[in-house]
Amino acid sequence: MVGEMSEESPVERVERVMHVIAGKWRPAIIYALVTQGPLRFVQLRRQIPRVTQRMLTQQLRDLERHGIVRRTFYEQIPPRVEYALTPLGRSLDPIFKRVCDWAEKNFPAVERARARYDDTRAGAREARVSSPRRTEP
């Protein structure tokens, strides 16, 4: 498995990397840690209020497995666990910054395109429903 990526096409490499950093909750987790630094579980959960405790735990474990997030357990009373980006995870900072910049600049156009598409699809659906169907004699 190690060294396998060099034999893959660029598209396959992007697909594998996106599997690690993309998904419903991972970008939000990474972004929170990029912008705010180390956070406790409860703090992360407040930043991403719609994520369930179970899903956040799963996503953090997987990001830790891939070397993006570091989990640090502090033996104290009460025990404390903090999540932080590893140097590999911090290397995603410029990528997230560019995505945020792109979104700020282009998201209104994306919203307009989606509305146009939805309106066109709705119009086509209405035309199909309202047009009389021919029946065979």
Image: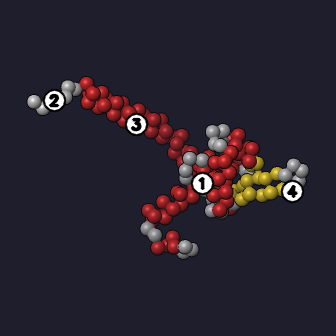
Q: Tell me the number on the disc at residue 134.
A: 2
Write the residue at 41% across / 36% down.
114
* Quadrant (top left, top right, bottom left, bottom right) of the N terminus: bottom right
Q: Looking at the image, is 86 positioned above or below residue 137?
A: below
Q: Distance between the residues labelled 2 and 3?
A: 35 Å
94 and 61: which one is in front?
Answer: 61
Of callouts 2 and 3, the N-terminal one: 3
Q: Which amino acid does label 2 sit on?
A: Arg
Q: What residue type is labelled 1?
A: Pro
Query: Could you classify mark 1 by the number of other residues whose Cα lies within 10 Å: few (under 14), some (14-19), or many (20 or more)?
Result: few
Q: What residue type is labelled 4?
A: Glu
Disc 4, SS: loop
Q: Tell me the number on the disc at residue 82.
A: none
**Which residue position is annotated with label 3?**
113
**Which residue position is annotated with label 1?**
94
Image coords of residue 49 (percent x, y): 66, 38
Can you tell which of label 1 and label 3 is closer to the viewer?
A: 3
User: Is residue 88 visible from the viewing direction of this image?
Assistant: no
Disc 3, SS: helix
Q: Tell me the number on the disc at residue 75.
A: 4
Q: Distance between the residues labelled 1 and 3?
A: 27 Å
Choose top left, top right, bottom left or bottom right for residue 85.
bottom right
Q: How far apart are marks 4 and 2 (CA)?
A: 76 Å
Write the residue at 29% across / 31% down.
124
